[in-house]
Image (spheres, rainbow, N blue to C red):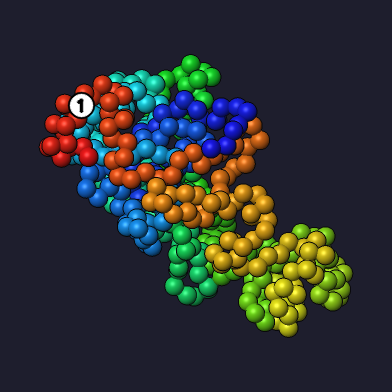
């Protein structure tokens, strides 16, 4: 643990996390890194399926080690009435509840927003789902990839005329989680600063993606224009693209007026840099193919490591396309603690992403590694008055583990 001069930003905030996989748990991870006490409820037996996703070491996914750090695990069968009763007792003492079940699931378990708010008027309840808690699509199953498609992102992630592709990570889930974190923090602030009670926060995967789609709808509304896939370029902004080098690709963003002039000077094309019609973005967009060809001809004869120093010297934003290896070895990221060494409960250490944002007075911390399934069941349930005999009976029935 790191000795800090101030309490963590969210010290004293208790979160019950009932979600699984990515969207809900990523939100819990975020809150936990800044001091919230996150109690994760998992089903006995297998636990959160993320424990077994992708690459496994010592029987557990390394992804789990990041997603569930700073959390406590309580294994409760929420399908059983006794399990639902335990969950309600935990929620009664919580500040925040996170869930990402299919809409209607908690209602079937007797844990609707109305019921839980009556039980705990201060409760802030975050609900993440494919399409939201209302509307004609609410009952449809929805994963992040569908949110990315219906939010408008997938249509743009392709080369022109080619099949739309994934961004490469579960961006729909994490965008929804980050919107959820914002909602939780605003609700907690309202509760404290304005004397307000708790509230329900409804985040849809589709809407979280749609919310970051920039000018998609205004352009269609005013001009009837449907923005199309443009590969690595930035439509309507020039020049900004990926350019082939001898040993890979480099991203160059020369789309500021003064930056464009410096870029053209750096690649020996002062004829373009001084052209009156290229002095602003509109003119450059009209001749973007010519400009891209000029930049591409220059980069094609050089390695990435030759291109980047020239761009740095000219103060032109540029960067290589990083792999995991590049990120892992980057000195800047390490200097900013974006690659951290984390010990697991299984006895091995691994490098993990650091914490964002960087806060001067109440920085986020890695306080505890990801828990084993049900590791904290007894401690958490005893704290709400479950006796040793009652706990033994619940274990015998398989309600807890």
46 relative to 382, above or below: below
- Taking the image as shown, residue 243 lies to the left or right of residue 223, namely right
305 relative to 171, above or below: below
| Residue 222 spot, x, y in % from top left | 57, 53
Work out whether residue 7 or residue 100 is closer to the camera in this orientation and state it.
7
Q: Is residue 179 visible?
A: no
Work out whether residue 84 or residue 209 is closer to the camera in this orientation and state it.
84
Q: Quadrant of residue 263?
A: bottom right
89 relative to 332, above or below: above
- Quadrant position of the C terminus in the picture: top left
Q: Quadrant of residue 261?
A: bottom right
Residue named by callout 1: 388
Total marks in image? 1
Mark 1 nearby-residue class (10 Å; few <14, some 14–19, many ≥20): few
148 relative to 30, above or below: below
Residue beneath the point at 45% across and 40% down: 368
Work out whether residue 83 or residue 159 is closer to the camera in this orientation and state it.
83
| Residue 12 spot, x, y in % from top left | 47, 25
Residue beneath the point at 32% across and 57% down: 59
- Taking the image as shown, residue 234 lies to the left or right of residue 192, namely right
């Amino acid at each position: 643990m790191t000795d800090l001069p101030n309490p963590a930003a969210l010290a004293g905030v208790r979160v019950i996390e009932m979600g699984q996989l990515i969207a809900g748990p990523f939100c819990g991870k975020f809150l936990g890194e800044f001091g919230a006490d996150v109690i994760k409820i998992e089903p006995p037996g297998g636990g959160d399926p993320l424990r077994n996703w992708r690459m496994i070491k010592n029987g557990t996914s390394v992804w789990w080690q990041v997603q569930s750090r700073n959390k406590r695990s309580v294994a409760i069968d929420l399908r059983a009435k006794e399990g639902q009763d335990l969950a309600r007792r935990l929620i009664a003492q919580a500040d925040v509840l996170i869930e990402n079940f299919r809409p209607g699931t908690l209602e079937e378990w007797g844990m609707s927003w109305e019921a839980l708010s009556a039980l705990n008027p201060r409760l802030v309840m975050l609900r993440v789902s494919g399409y939201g808690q209302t509307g004609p699509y609410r009952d449809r199953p929805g994963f992040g990839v569908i949110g990315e498609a219906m939010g408008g992102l997938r249509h743009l992630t392709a080369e022109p005329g080619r099949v739309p592709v994934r961004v490469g990570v579960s961006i729909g889930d994490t965008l929804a989680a980050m919107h959820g974190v914002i909602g939780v923090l605003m609700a907690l602030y309202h509760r404290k600063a304005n004397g307000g009670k708790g509230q329900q926060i409804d985040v849809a995967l589709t809407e979280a993606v749609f919310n970051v789609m920039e000018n998609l709808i205004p352009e269609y509304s005013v001009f009837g224009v449907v923005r199309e896939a443009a590969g690595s370029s930035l439509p309507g902004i020039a020049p900004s693209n990926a350019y082939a080098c001898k040993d890979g690709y480099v991203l160059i963003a020369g789309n500021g007026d003064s930056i464009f002039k410096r870029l053209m000077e750096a690649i020996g094309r002062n004829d373009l840099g001084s052209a009156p019609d290229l002095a602003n973005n509109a003119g450059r967009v009209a001749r973007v193919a010519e400009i891209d060809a000029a930049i591409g001809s220059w980069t094609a004869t050089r390695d990435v490591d030759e291109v980047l120093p020239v761009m740095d010297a000219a103060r032109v934003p540029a960067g290589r396309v990083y792999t995991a290896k590049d990120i892992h070895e980057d000195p800047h990221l390490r200097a900013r603690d974006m690659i951290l060494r984390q010990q697991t409960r299984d006895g091995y250490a691994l490098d993990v992403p650091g914490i964002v944002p960087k806060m001067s007075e109440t920085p986020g911390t890695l306080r505890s590694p990801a828990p084993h399934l049900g590791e904290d069941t007894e401690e958490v349930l005893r704290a709400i008055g479950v006796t040793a005999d009652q706990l033994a009976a619940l274990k015998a029935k398989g309600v807890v583990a």
